[in-house]
Amino acid sequence: MLLALASQPGIAQTARPIDPTTAVSTQPLDAASSDAGSTDEALRAGYDKRQKALDKRTSENDYRYGVKQHDCYSKFFVNHCLDNARTEMREARQQIRQEQLALDDEQRAERAKERDRQTGLKQAQYEAEAPQRAANEKSNQQAYEDKQRQNALAAAQRDAEAPQRTANQAAYDRKQADYQKKLDEARARGVAEAQEREQKAQRYEQKQQEAAQHRAEVDARQKEAARKQQEKAQQAQQEQQRQDQLKQQQQQQQQQQQQQGK
């Protein structure tokens, strides 16, 4: 436990950089703590050495007590021997404890000194950088005021340009309205023209159908007339053939009569 305390961080440690929340740069602190670092290392090495020696004495004391306990059981006056061994162990442990407490006190005192030294360095550095901080604050304030003036000028310019922006917006709205009106009219014309084209297409299709029907009717009448004409021609031909046959028969009859008369 004592060894663990001696080895904890922050006990006789070298100077650490300044916390950034203090708004202090680390360069002066590093330079100021360079000499103190070597001293801290030496102190810590001494503390470690003394702590190891105390730990070793504690272990040896416990070991001797265990050996003496073991040896006492082989003697005649066992209890007396154990009491003596226990007394020697306690006296040695008490002495080690006193030295351990002294070592702990020294380390606590050294840590307190280290904290004071770090606090002093930070305070000194903080005070040394006070002019620079003041200059930075003044510069920041000046930049803030310049920004405020710029914002005020921009606001005034926007206010001055407001009527022009309103007029421009009105002109833009009128232009958009005219464009929308023309667009609507164009769409309406497109719809009307599409309907007219559709109607024309329907009328044309109807005319084509009527013309086709008319041609079909004409073809049918022509075919009927040709058929009738052909029938008449056939009838006339048949009549002519009948007439020719009758005439031929008459001529044959006449010839027969003439031959009979002779």
Image (tube, rainbow, N blue to C red):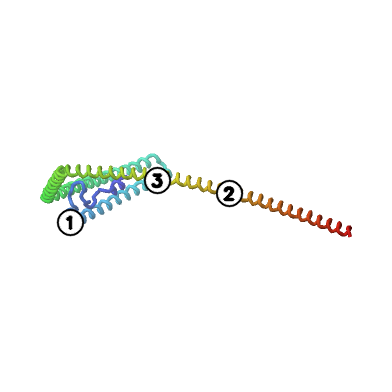
Identify the mark at residue 218; answer none if there is no mark: 2
The residue that disc 1 covers is 31
- Amino acid identity at mark 2: Val
Cα gap from disc 2 to disc 3, whole angstroms: 36 Å
The residue that disc 3 covers is 193
> Tag 2: Cα neighbours inside 10 Å, few (<14), some, or many (≥20)?
few
Residue 178 image position (x, y, % from top left): 28, 44
Foreground mark, 2 or 1, reads 2
Foreground mark, 2 or 3, reads 2
Number of numbered tags placed on the structure image? 3
Element at label 3:
helix
> Tag 3: Cα neighbours inside 10 Å, few (<14), some, or many (≥20)?
few
- Amino acid identity at mark 1: Ala
Element at label 1:
helix
- Asked if the residues shown at circle 3 and circle 1 are in contact, with their CB atoms under 8 angstroms apart, the answer is no
Q: In which quarter of the image is residue 261?
A: bottom right
Residue 52 image position (x, y, % from top left): 30, 51
> Tag 1: Cα neighbours inside 10 Å, few (<14), some, or many (≥20)?
few
- Amino acid identity at mark 3: Glu
Residue 83 image position (x, y, % from top left): 36, 40
